[in-house]
Image: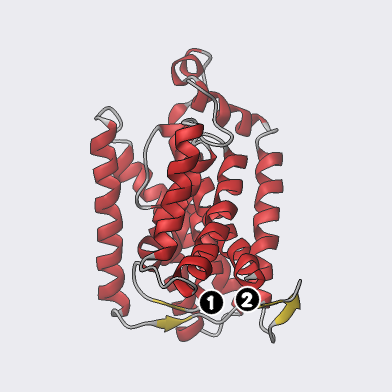
Amino acid sequence: MWTFLVQGVFQGAVYGLLAVGLVLVYKGTRVFNFAQGEFGSVAAFVTWGLLLHTAVPYLVAFVGGLLAAVAMGLLVERAVVRPLFAASRLILLVATVGVALLAIALTVLAAQPQARVLPPAVAGEPITVAGASVLPQQILVLVALAAVAAGLAGFFRTDLGLAVLAVSQDPVATRVVGINPVMLSRVIWGLAAGLGGLAGLLQAPVGIFTPGFMTATTLLPAFAAAVLGGMTSLPGAFAGGVAIGVAQNLGIYLLGQQLAVPGAAELTVFGLLLAVLLVRPQGLLGKAA
């Protein structure tokens, strides 16, 4: 069971990265972004393509994948979100679903639907951590999560970061004092897309990946993590991601392997989410309305 617990922490770190991007977009623009997973899928496929068809070093391909994700985020903000911003949030939600489906279709056309393998950023034999076998790539996930947390903490102490926080609290007041909401929207979507891209690049080397793999396997747990943390709390999104990852893996062990319950992972995740929301409707770190 200990191995499942440790593996859950590492998987939860990926959920946490994706959940932070979801929370950033929701706090800043009040959009539930169902295209968040595709930032990660696109980053993984661009990195894979650069490694396969060029002689660039791994780090250059990795950065290229991240930049592709950020570019996609900025394109979505400019071409989809901004023209529809005055529409209802439901229309924007459906629009992001459309973006995700379009991204998956274009990836299939460009790369075919076969499974791919992305080499890990950190290669090596599994190592033992607290009695559990862990890949170096998985340790990198935790390091990345800590680095992102520290980076965001520093960013939100800058003038630009404070402006992002301000627009998430009171968009009307920020316009009154002269803060440019269009520029902030670009920053928010660019940051969220970069986090989604990073999550995809860290998740893809753990196994095989296919077009839309982040949307299919990671988006719903990340949304659950964001809601569990409060949907407006960045620390809550991090914590919610780890909690969801641990719950998912413990559910696989306790319900799936021990009791042969079908759908054990999903049952545990959404059971945990329901239990928390019944006790604290605002989430673990969210504020009551």
Question: Is 114 situated above or below 70?
Answer: below
> Residue at position x 53%, y 65% from top?
249
Q: Amino acid at mark 2?
A: Ala
Side of 212 relative to 88 (left or right): right
Picture coordinates of residue 257 (x, y %)? 48, 74
* Along the viewing direction, whichever of 156 and 277 lies nearer the viewer: 277
> Residue at position x 59%, y 34% from top?
285
Picture coordinates of residue 95 (x, y %)? 25, 45
- Residue 10 - label: none
Q: Are marks 2 and 1 in contact (CB under 8 Å)?
A: yes
> Residue at position x 65%, y 67% from top?
6
Picture coordinates of residue 58 (x, y %)? 60, 78
Q: Nearer the viewer, mark 2 or mark 1?
A: 1
- Residue 121 - label: 2
Q: Amino acid at mark 1?
A: Pro
Q: Quadrant of the N terminus?
A: bottom right
- Residue 205 - label: 1
Q: How many C-alpha atoms fall within 10 Å of the one at disc 1: few (<14), some, or many (≥20)?
A: many
Question: Is 244 situated above or below 119?
Answer: above
Identify the element where label 1 is drawn.
helix
Q: Is any part of residue 86 visible from this angle?
A: yes
> Residue at position x 60%, y 48% from top?
238
Picture coordinates of residue 142 (x, y %)? 67, 62
Q: Is any part of residue 183 visible from this angle?
A: no
